Amino acid sequence: MIRISDILKKAKEQPKHKEEKTSQEASLSKTGEGHGISELLPSGHVYPNPEFKQPAFVCKEKASEVSGEIKKEYMEKDLRQPEDISISSLLNKPASYEETEKLYQEMFSLAHTVVGESIDYAAVDVSKLVAHIEKVVEQLTLSNEKPLMLAFLKDSADTNYLFSHAVNVCIYALEIGLAQGYSRLNLIELGVFAFLHDASMAKFLFSASQKPELTNEDRKDVKKYLIAISRIFSCINGFCNLPSDMLAQDTSLLDNVERFLSLKAESFSRYAKLISVVDFYEAMTHRGIYGSRHSSLEAVQEILNNKEKFEQGIIKVLIDRIGIFPVGSLIKLSTRETAQVIRLNRGKPLRPVIKILFDTQGKKLQGEKILDLSQHPTIYIKEEEKTAEAKS
């Protein structure tokens, strides 16, 4: 019997987070070179043991109860912190659940102004977007699992799918960027494009940067997006600033933008490859274009079934840092207990740290019971339960 956890041990260790660089481009090393994706997760051996079942739906009553307990638990742990503390004041300190949720909601609200049709990109508050992304980077750097948990649990109503999708893709992309050694400035730029990836302006930049020269149609788009492009890169302090006189001198405008896109072609290509994996994974595990939520295991299996469309190194990091069983997911154990994943063990995607929520009879557990499955080899995850779809 082949286990994913055993196979993953063969892969090379992911590179350590590199120190922030002062050069324009960070060295974005690929992970897991020399190992084909078929070695990582061979077809037919996705499930950890013969008893591993397809994901089952947990009853809405239990899911609702679990969701309430999650929030209550995190907020109770942070009662020592004054309620009026803002995220921006928490330097080098993990934010509370309440503060992290506030940050998520602020980003969700901001998505209303940058995602969708007929957006006035010149009016977008780019500085606010960059500031929010900096906060997420800070929290993920501090190993705060709460942003990842919210990205997994937060879902959209049918009318605003793209808004939470933008936030979730941004958070996931930043986590993978950290694992791949992106500098802080690279992370901020990646976060901006992950947040805007469904916007026509971002699609234009990714597409135009891969062309040897701009077409007449591209040149029209340059004029349409110019103010927003300039503001975005000038807001990323000291990084990829466009010439300050670009707007004043229309004669040099196109040449400047074309040169800028040429210089950014390699990094834009890397961002696009990373975002494409995260975009697909998030879309499958949340309501949207694929209908109801699929389990994360189903999403990973589908990515592997279409591995030729995605970069192998990014898939490996996705499995290691986002997880086959993400932080926040509900699982059924071989002991017949129901638990929630509260932390991942990197390099061991099937052996996370969990909190037991319900006993073998389905009754709510009294008291706290935390298990690190990497230390309990006889206990394994039997199936994944889908939570009720929460609305943002």
Image (tube, rainbow, N blue to C red):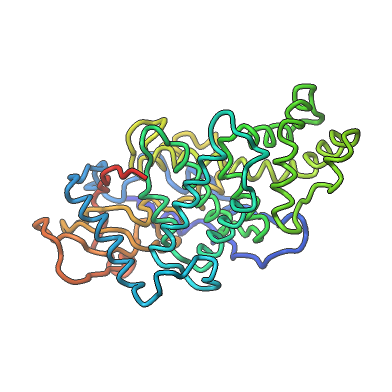
Q: Is residue 392 left or right of residue 108?
A: left
Q: What residue is at 47 percent from the left and 40 percent from the top?
A: 163
Residue 101, by quadrant, is bottom left
Q: Which of these two is toward me, 74 or 41?
A: 74
Q: Residue furthest top?
A: 216
210 or 123, which lies in front?
A: 123
User: Where is residue 10 shown, x and y percent of the image?
Assistant: 48, 57
Seen at 59% across and 59% down, the residue is: 134
195 over 130 or under it: above or below = above
Compared across the picture, whether 38 is left or right of 186 comes to left
Q: In the image, 289: left or right of 243?
A: left
Nearer the observer, 233 or 231: 231
The picture quadrant where one finds residue 141 is: bottom right
x, y percent for residue 282: 44, 42
Above-or-below relation of 298 to 318:
above
User: In this rendering, is residue 214 above or below 108?
Assistant: above
Quadrant in which the C terminus is drawn: top left
* Total count of labels: 0
- Residue drawn at the location 14% of the way across and 69% of the way down: 366
Residue at 44% across, 43% down: 164
Residue lying farthest to the left in this orientation = 361
The x and y percentages for residue 179 are 56, 59
User: In the picture, residue 347 is in which quadrant?
Assistant: bottom left
Residue 182, percent across and down?
64, 58
